[in-house]
Amino acid sequence: MKIRLEWYYTPLKTKQSFFMKSDWMSVASSLMLHDDLEKTGRLKSIEFLDEQDTAWTKKQLIKFLKQFETEPHDVIAYIDGGFDKATRSAGIGLAIYYKQNHKNWRIRFNDTLELLEDNNEAEYAALHRLLMQLTEMNVHHQTIRIYSDSMIVVNQASGEWPCYEEHYLNWLDRIDQSAKKLGLTLEYKLVDRSLNKEADQLATQALEGIEIKSVIEKV
């Protein structure tokens, strides 16, 4: 989670207060800056704001930091979807890397879906399944880096391209609602298919009827 500070400050030899705002920084850095400003004795008021413009108190942020190491964080996800036109079946694959309790972990899994219309919708289904998994893992108030080789999904989901297809919009609405509920900022990265082999293979295996689900510690 990134935090910015907004505060009113009264310089020496004047009674006038000035509004100031910081750049985005880590929670730990925001707490240190707050303490430094408070030591001056010229701080009138200060507010901690996250990337969703939600206000936090100092006490809440300290509690968040204490919980952080025991909860999944530094999450990176690779997603992919495949679609078989003949059977109208879709396969999705996900590989999620994260840290928890001072260890590195990886979750890999896939799934099959029916009643989708095309490959792009399968990609959206994979993205939605990622949000469901993050909900199960209690991942919240973080920036999640998501890697996909789908130009359409990355650009539409990030807001770079407009989306007019109703069946894609339905997925986008659910994804946005889930992210907002969890306090997540979704950061999309378009990658070449060669760099998304893990998720691609999982999606292909799903279409072949091979079910994969594993959680391992990465040494």
Image: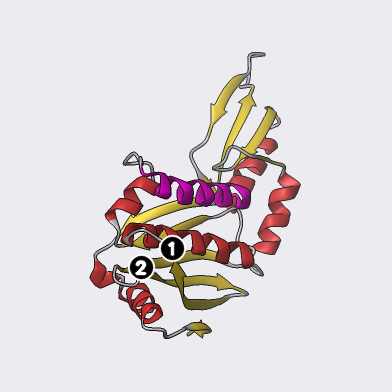
Residue 50 position within the rendered picture, expressed as x and y whole percent measured from the top left: 58, 43
Q: Is residue 135 left or right of residue 82?
A: right
Judged from the image, the secondary structure of the residue bearing numbered disc 2 is: loop
Residue 79 falls within the magenta-colored stretch: no
Disc ID at residue 88: 2
Q: CA distance from mark 2 to mark 1?
A: 7 Å
Q: Main secondary structure of the magenta part?
A: helix
* Nearer to us in this view, 153 or 36: 153
Q: Specify which label sits upstream in the sequence, 2 or 1.
A: 2
Disc ID at residue 135: none
Q: Is residue 10 above or below residue 114?
A: above
Say whether residue 120 is visible: yes
* Nearer to us in this view, 61 or 28: 61
Say whether residue 1 is visible: no
> In the rendered image, which residue does mark 1 sit on?
115
Q: Is residue 38 above or below residue 191?
A: above
Give the quarter of the image for residue 113: bottom left
Q: Is residue 27 left or right of residue 197?
A: right
Q: Is residue 92 above or below residue 206?
A: above
Residue 59 position within the rendered picture, expressed as x and y whole percent measured from the top left: 75, 48
Q: Tell me the amino acid under the disc marked 1.
A: Leu
Image marks 2 and 1: residues in contact by CB distance under 8 Å: yes
* Nearer to us in this view, 153 or 171: 171
The 10 Å Cα crowd at callout 2, few under 14, some 14 to 19, many 20 or more, is: some
For image coordinates 59% across by 32% down, the residue present is 6
Magenta range is 165-183
For image coordinates 30% across by 75% down, the residue present is 197
* Nearer to us in this view, 150 or 29: 150
Judged from the image, the secondary structure of the residue bearing numbered disc 1 is: loop
